[in-house]
Image: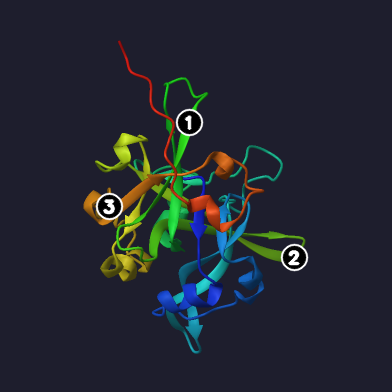
Amino acid sequence: MCGRVYIKTSLEELVRNFAFAERGAIDALGNRFPLYNGAPTLDYPIIIRDMVREPDIMGPIFASARWGLMPAWMKPGGRPPPINARCEGISTNGLFRSAYRSRRCLVPINGFFEWKDIFGTGKNKQPYAIAMADGSPFALAGIWETRRDNDIEIRSFAIITCEPNEMMAQIHDRMPVILHREDYERWLSPEPDPNDLMKPFPAELMTMWPIGRKVGSPKNDTADIIDPIDPDPEPTLI
């Protein structure tokens, strides 16, 4: 799964790094970045295909959205909104198929976190930070929805996951779908099922490193979250 991300730049720099998209109504997010320990339920800048100029000119535009997909028909107070959507079966899954068909988005980040279950018991997990090998920002594949709450329109999103590449397989059995820049336009297009884009990103273009366990609490949000550490030695099986 993908349950934590980081954005180590200001909102202005993030927008400049994805300059193909119009700015949109995201000014309210400005004071929240950099964000070194981004968890679900928070609001993030995402890129969607929407009206960018009158009359009827559609294109990529930044928008604000809450992490945790809430379709209009989902009753609040029930099960937690899903933060991830598995690519397998997404086109037929009743919770995701409508958004996947017509409301796909990009989630721009600098990196994400994953935990390796060292002993296989779920009780001792080593966190890792994962990013591009060249340090560049990148975009995850997502889907989005809108609903009205007390006459306020709320946009929400989920991140799509796939099988891991060779690097990620060392620590986890899933990874988020990372899109190549040349595929951004197609992912945002009206094409109903670009399923060939939902695949593991090349491992040789990525890097990962062990980090401290303070990332486990979203209350900790400082730059040293992503500092590399020497992990505890793993047990030797006899």
The residue under the point 54% across, 54% down is 224
**C-alpha gap between disc 1 and disc 3:** 24 Å
Residue identifier under label 2: 151
Q: Which mark is residue 125?
A: 1
Q: Which mark is nearer the camera, 1 or 3?
A: 1
Q: Does residue 105 lie above or below 4 as drawn? A: below
The quarter in which the N terminus is drawn is top left
Q: Residues within 10 Å of mark 2 (few under 14, many from 20)?
A: few
Q: Which mark is nearer the camera, 1 or 2?
A: 1
Q: Which mark is residue 171?
A: none
Q: Amino acid at mark 1?
A: Lys
Observer-nearest of 5 and 26: 5
**Mark earlier in primary sequence (3, 2):** 2
Observer-nearest of 144 and 137: 137
The residue under the point 63% across, 69% down is 29
Residues under numbered marks 3 and 2 in contact, where contact means CB atoms less than 8 Å apart: no
Q: Which mark is nearer the camera, 3 or 2?
A: 3
